[in-house]
Amino acid sequence: MMRSSAVCFRVVLAFAIAVPFAPVSQLFAAPPTPAHWSVQHLPSRPVAPGAAFTVTLAAAVQPGWHLYALEEPEGGPLATEIGLQQGDPLTLLDVSEPDPARVPDPVTHSVAGVFLSDVNFTLKLRAPRTRPAADAVSHVLVRYQTCNDQVCLPPRTETVALPLKGLIR
């Protein structure tokens, strides 16, 4: 019995030495995030309580990656979704996007709307009827999926903070 254990140990050891290991930093590295989100183009002056205004939700997309449009065909890829956190002080009235590129999607066998580089979504929002607290923050939620020509990453939901200080008079 002792002899078979020693042989087994040698086989495992030889295999372990022969197989190249990834650096430990790669084994525990976070998945890539090819899209980074920010709120830009806030109104230049404070808006009146209850007034509508627009901001830009910008996606900086790394070269070689893409994300999908707001509307995709049924059975197609995961469309980008934009909303506000439940109970948010602002009201989301509308979301618009530039015209996406239309490309064949080999996975879903459909034509998908994609953004192959940075993209700006326009959010039409309504301010609350009463002035929010000085430290109030709105939370824009973005659910999206990024892909390149080899892999699609799992869908992600990002929260983008929009401080309301000085935004509403």
Image (cartoon, grey):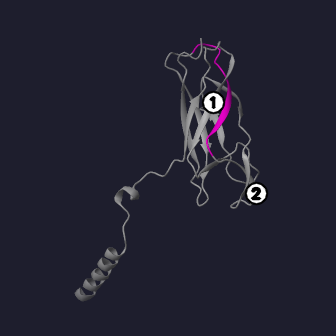
Where is 6 relative to 129, above or below? below
Circle 1 sits on which residue?
56
Instruction: Identify which residue, 164 or 148, lies in the foreground.
Output: 148
Helix, strand, or loop for circle 1?
A: strand
Q: Quadrant of residue 141?
A: top right
Instruction: Identify which residue, 3 or 54, lies in the foreground.
Output: 54
Residue 119: in magenta span: yes
Circle 2 sits on which residue?
110
Name the residue rendered at 59%, 61% in the picture: 150
- Mark 2: amino acid: Ser
Find residue 124 and report its horizontal and vertical position in percent: 69, 26
Residue 17: in magenta span: no
Tell me which numbered mark, 1 or 2, is placed earlier along the sequence. Answer: 1
Rendered image: mark on residue 159: none
Q: Residue furthest left?
A: 2
Where is 40 relative to 151, above or below? above
Where is 76 relative to 127, above or below? below
Real-space Cα separation, disc 1 to disc 2, in angstroms: 29 Å
Name the residue rendered at 48%, 52% in the picture: 31
Task: Report crowding for label 1: few under 14, some 14 to 19, many 20 or more residues within 10 A (C-alpha).
Answer: some
Q: Which residues are magenta?
A: 117-131
Find residue 135 and report its horizontal and vertical position in percent: 49, 19
Helix, strand, or loop for circle 2?
A: strand
User: In which quadrant of the rendered image does the C terminus lie?
Assistant: top right
Q: Nearer the viewer, mark 1 or mark 2?
A: 1
Instruction: Identify which residue, 64 or 88, lies in the foreground.
Output: 64
Q: Quadrant of residue 38?
A: top right
